[in-house]
Amino acid sequence: MRVNFTVNGRPQEADDVWEGESLLYVLRERLGLPGSKNACEQGECGSCTVRLDGVPVCSCLVAAGQVEGRDVVTVEGLADFAKQRACGSTCGTPLDEAKQWAAKGQDSQTGEGTELSPIQQAFIDAGAVQCGFCTPGLLVAADEMLERNPNPTDADIREALSGNLCRCTGYEKIMDAVRLAAARQSEGV
Amino acid sequence: MDFLRPASWEEALAAKAEHPTAVPIAGGTDVMVEINFDHRRPEYLLDLNRVTDLTEWEVGQDSVRLGASVPYTRVMENLRAELPGLALASHTVASPQIRNRGGVGGNLGTASPAGDAHPALLAAGAEVEVESVRGSRLIPIDDFYTGVKRNALAPDELIRAVHIKKADGPQQYSKVGTRNAMVIAVCAFGLALHPETRTVRTGIGSAAPTPVRAKAAEEFLNAALEEGGFWDNGKIITPSVAKQFADLCAAACNPIDDVRGTASYRRHAVGIMARRTLTWTWESYRGTAARTEGVA
Ligand SMILES: Cc1cc2nc3c(=O)[nH]c(=O)nc-3n(C[C@H](O)[C@H](O)[C@H](O)COP(=O)(O)OP(=O)(O)OC[C@H]3O[C@@H](n4cnc5c(N)ncnc54)[C@H](O)[C@@H]3O)c2cc1C
Ligand code: FES
Ligand code: FES
């Protein structure tokens, strides 16, 4: 079947979709967006987290056909999404650009200056990324929490990220990163 | 496989009548796991996401009519006062991502003995509104669970909503697991005080082939509370009464040994949860009773 939906602000069409296929599979294998990770395919790890009509969900548990006509934001579109939220414009991320998206820090060592969302920058600055497999899901989940709750307590952060497993960091650096993003957000940096 | 996408409740009922083997999919948090792991290859998937009636709820005089697909997150955020037991139980389900998708209709559809909604529904008192092209009926929650992962739905029926009694007293929900998030219950216990009828209701999860009430324990406690005038005098429940209640709750279990726990541990834990939830709810009842009567 064919599925039409919006990905990162742009209309997309996926063809030859099998009826039992997940949104995660469509994103990764049909649209070439491998940012959302597949680690368990059973909702346990959160590495496939995307926003569906704004709501964080495990894309491995959404049937492809269920997203027809709906709006999905993936980690590849997170920087633009955060920028639009800040400035209120609506430009979206073209699929080609999203496919080529790569994290480039804004620090002086790389100097490339590709824009990251504040939460992405905070993860780099706090050293919250090791193997990186859990990172996309955590970024999407943490970004949504900060949108909803700009001044989270530690308990709020733990709760919001309780569906995201990380096997490397021990979570402390992740907590640091989210606190950092929250602090920068409230300072308006 | 065919993907059926009814745009309305009537269309959904018609599709289910035409294809009784079609598997409804709401939040997909049970169905997609089975498909991803090839445990299930239904001929038809019947998507309920476009039937927006199912994500709505109405708060009535005595009960809440909760649409089958209202996600747990909504229950936690919006119905904590009316359905405290279910809101607490909802909060223990999985993770935010799962709670944003899954709901009570899917929990009832799966009818797992470990489903967290069940003990809360049993304790509060509820009826499941099911419908087919043949008509609609209300199934009392006590008659809904018919076996391990089996329920009273006919092949052409869909769950429209659950009618849950609004709380008229304190309710609690307790669950045993290895961590707070992402845990399927080793066992669980729901308790609701109903001061208006002067009754106590219970619900036990994961400790029998189906979710069950501890009816003998309820009867014992109802009689003991009545005899001792507890509902009026608001006294602390006698420890021997609480213990007897806990023992009868443990005796209502018919658990198995499995990877999550042994049968004897489950029985033990249900007894502990019964005593604790009784203490918590009763303390809270006494607090409100004292306030409303102006007694210190
Ligand atoms: C990682 C993970 C953790 C989980 N943890 C918990 C937990 O802690 N506690 C818990 O209780 N559950 C848990 N679950 C199970 C699941 O999330 C719940 O059972 C949830 O309530 C299912 O709701 P859903 O809308 O996603 O159901 P779906 O998967 O869409 O459907 C479930 C079943 O119900 C049927 N169905 C759905 N809607 C209807 C309807 N309107 N009429 C008739 N049949 C219908 C479907 O055909 C299917 O058989 C977990 C699942 C995952 C993946
Ligand atoms: S891959 Fe979806 S939750 Fe793990
Ligand atoms: S950084 Fe490796 S899983 Fe989190």
Image (tube, grey):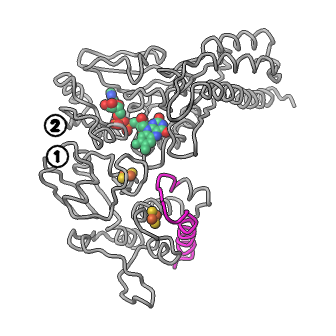
Pinpoint residue B64: horizontal percent, then vertical percent. Answer: 49, 28
Residue B103 shows in the view: no
Pinpoint residue A120: horizontal percent, then vertical percent. Answer: 44, 72
Q: Identify the subunit bearing mark 2.
A: B
Q: Identify the subunit bearing mark 1.
A: A
Residue nearer the viewer, B174 or A172: A172
Residue with the mark numbered 1: A18
| Mark number displayed over residue B1 | 2
Q: Is residue A60 one of those drawn in magenta? A: no
Dot 2 alpha-carbon crowd within 10 angstroms: few under 14, some 14 to 19, many 20 or more? few
The relative height of residue B255 versus residue A16 in the rendered view (above or below) is above
**Residue type indicated by callout 2:** Met
Ligand 3 quadrant assignment:
bottom left
- Answer with left or right where residue B232 lies relative to residue B147: right
**Residue type indicated by callout 1:** Trp
Pinpoint residue B238: horizontal percent, then vertical percent. Answer: 82, 20
Residue nearer the viewer, B202 or B37: B37
Q: Residue at x 45, y 19 (%)?
A: B127
Q: Which residues are magenta?
A: A160-189
Dot 2 falls on a residue whose secondary structure is: loop
Q: How many marks?
A: 2
Q: Residue at x 37, y 86 (%)?
A: A113
Is ligand 2 closer than 8 angstroms to the Cβ of mark 1? no
Within the image, what quadrant is residue A111 found in? bottom left
Callouts 1 and 2 close, C-beta under 8 Å:
yes
Residue nearer the viewer, B199 or B167: B199
